[in-house]
Image: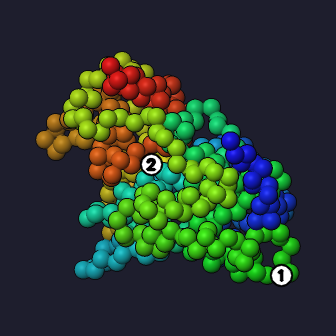
Amino acid sequence: MVDKKQNVEVRDQKSISKNEMQGFLRHLSTKRALVCPVDTGKVIEFREVDIALLDMNQGSILDATRILDDHVSYKSIKEYYFPQTELMFTFENDDIVDNKDIPGYAIFGARPCDLEALRVMTAVYSTGKYADPFFHRRFEANFLIGIGCKNLKPECFCQEMGVDKEFSDFCDVMLTDNGDCYIVEYLSEKGRSELDGYLRDENHPLGFVSAQNHPPAVAGTLFSKRANKIDEPSPGLRDAENAECRMQNAEIRGGVTGELEKSFALDVEKDDTEYFDIIDWAKVTEMCKGCGICTYICPTCYCFDFKDVSKKGTAERYKCWDSCMYPKFTLHASGHNPREHRHERYRQRVLHKYKYVPNNFDGVIACTGCGRCVRSCPVGVNIKDILKQIIEKNDD
Ligand code: SF4
Ligand code: SF4
């Protein structure tokens, strides 16, 4: 068996010291607003940070050590691609003025489950006639740096979902923890071009991998479909180019491809209705309060609604998160509601992730096992346990 850690150490020169991360973050913040996981005192969550405060070591919120800790954030990076409320356009007299004021963020510290969730969202929002220009613009404007997890946290089930907790290639640059330093991998042209200038500064104190030291096979194998041509079908969805990239990255990392088998998957060949009574949905969700938290904090939940707001002489249209756990989500104008009961709505949530998205997007499952919905449900509804029950029935 390959000793991955040992292999990584052999390649120590392609790394950045943890002591120098503050300088790295400072560099990231020169072009874009910096977003990092920060400790609010209650939760770890992604927030825009002021690097000047970070420099001054301002207490718990911007503690660089916490940024690098092996924690899972309460929410994911979703809102930097799909904000909770987003202005789409303004009606002014007879004109419709598109909102092109899309900020670009340097997002540091996304975990593999959230990177894979972004892959799902990219598939949904970038393909077919419903491609979403707002998502595209943010995707192109953002610069994304991932960090592998060292440990599974309570309620994580990424491995059952085929997600490698240490690695995802769905970002511009990936860092892998290696003790007192991080191994660095460029995964897009954007990643390379953004960091090359920085790394080429010979006066810079960082012992960071240079483009010259990077193996050409990796530096040149950049999944441009993902980063630069997002309007092409199925960006990054384990196509041949991406698979090649994974294998070359795996070589550096000592044989782990980031491609694991999914043990939690439903039979997508079955008719949808066969799942409607495969388990007692009312019983397994009897505690559910319909609060919708599970959908809001889920990195792959992407449903939204439109709201128009009128102001003197103008009106604005906003795209706002919605939740299939709310009764009005499916309420018809006639008064009929096809999913009147909570258990029907929860069933929809599960089947949408595990049956309908895979059917519509080439097998992609809209759950990465991040465990957030399990951790955050106020009454302990557990999607993992429910999936196990369905899979057991499937196997009968
Ligand atoms: S978080 Fe729990 S209680 Fe709230 S809607 Fe989801 S399953 Fe129901
Ligand atoms: S369904 Fe739950 S475990 Fe799966 S991605 Fe969403 S929040 Fe994470």
The residue furthest left is 334
Q: Residue at x 58, y 36 (%)?
A: 156
Q: Check mark 1 vs ligand 2: CB closer than 8 Å? yes or no.
A: no
Q: Residue at x 63, y 64 (%)?
A: 173
Q: Is residue 177 left or right of residue 295?
A: right
Colouring style: rainbow
Label 1: how many residues lie within 10 Å, few (<14), some (14-19) or many (20+)? few
Task: Please tell me the numbered disc located at residue 202.
Answer: 1
Quadrant position of the C terminus in the picture: top left
User: Pointers 2 and 1 in contact (CB under 8 A)?
Assistant: no
Does 32 appear above or below 391?
below
- Give the x, y percent position of residue 56: 84, 63
Does 57 appear above or below 335?
below
Determine which quarter of the picture holds residue 392. top left
The answer to whether residue 376 of the structure is visible from this angle is no
Q: Is residue 334 left or right of residue 383?
A: left
| Amino acid type shown at disc 2 | Thr
Q: In the image, which is nearer the foreground, mark 2 or mark 1? A: 1
Quadrant position of the N terminus in the picture: top right
Determine which quarter of the picture holds residue 288. top left
Q: Residue at x 80, y 65 (%)?
A: 13
Q: How many numbered circles are shown? A: 2
- Give the x, y percent position of residue 375: 56, 33
| Amino acid type shown at disc 1 | Glu
Residue matched to label 2: 300
Q: CA distance from mark 2 to mark 1?
A: 41 Å
The answer to whether residue 237 of the structure is visible from this angle is yes
Q: Check mark 2 vs ligand 2: CB closer than 8 Å? yes or no.
A: yes
- Give the x, y percent position of residue 387: 41, 29
Query: Foreground residue, 148 or 245?
Result: 245
> Of label 2 and label 1, which has the lower sequence position?
1
The residue furthest front is 1
